[in-house]
Image (cartoon, grey):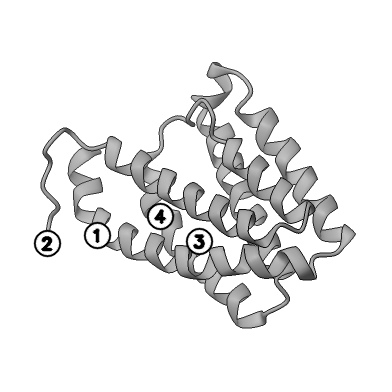
Amino acid sequence: MGAYLRTQLRLIYEILDFRTANECFAARLACGRRTQSHLDCLAELLGTMSGLCAQKAKREDVSNISQFLAADAEFHLTIAHAAGNKLIGKAVGDAHAAMFMPIGRVFKRLEDRANAHHETIYAAIRDQDADRAEKEMSLHIAATRKSLRNLLPPNAELSND
């Protein structure tokens, strides 16, 4: 896994940079443009993700991990749709699709607090706090970057492949 991740990490970091640019702005826009339907969908997805990572055994079950990642992608796409900008929606969808293969191969368990950032992002959008929504999305994507980096052995070099 470490060798594979090293070869993919540069691409993943580029995707995460792209996500930061698009999803932080999407979260900001969603605060002023979201509907109750968007909030209901986000709340339902939060419940799904919470259930999938509630217990250690569930966080290590491959089927649950796959379901969590699907719900996670839908959560982010819902925020992009709530932003009301089709180009941002497409960018967010494209970024999540690009991450699917490399991420799916490296996550063998979910973090204990895998859903914590989603809850704070949702709360900021619900409260229409654009500054907080943008900040929480940025923190979430930075945490994803850190989680991926932590899967590598200490002092591992990035591959140029």
Distance from disc 2 to disc 3, alpha carbons, whole Å, reads 23 Å
**Amino acid on which the number 3 mark rests in the picture:** His
- Labelled pair 2, 1 in contact (Cβ < 8 Å): yes
Give residue 160's mark. 2
Query: Taking 59 as reference, is 109 left or right?
Result: left
- Residue name at image x 60 percent, y 48 percent: 72
Identity, as a three-letter code, of the amino acid under mark 1: Arg
Q: Which residue is mark 1?
A: 10
Label 1 SS: helix
Marks 2 and 3: CB-CB under 8 Å?
Answer: no
Within 10 Å of disc 1 (Cα), the crowding (few <14, some 14-19, many 20+) is some
- The picture places residue 135, in percent across and down from the top left corner, at 54, 54
Q: Amino acid at mark 4?
A: Met
Under tag 4, what secondary structure? helix
Q: Which quadrant holds the N terminus?
A: top left
Left or right of 21 on screen, residue 106 = left
Whole-Å distance between the Cαs marked 1 and 4?
Answer: 14 Å
| Label 2 or label 3, whichever comes before in sequence order | 3
Q: Which element type, helix, strand or loop, lies under badge 3? A: helix
Expressed as whole percent of the image width and height from the top left, the position of residue 144 reads: 42, 46
Q: Which residue is mark 4?
A: 101
Residue name at image x 49 percent, y 31 percent: 110
The disc at residue 96 is: 3
Picture disc at residue 137 = none
Q: Earlier in the sequence, mark 3 or mark 1?
A: 1
Q: How many marks?
A: 4
Give the residue drawn at x 73%, y 76%: 84
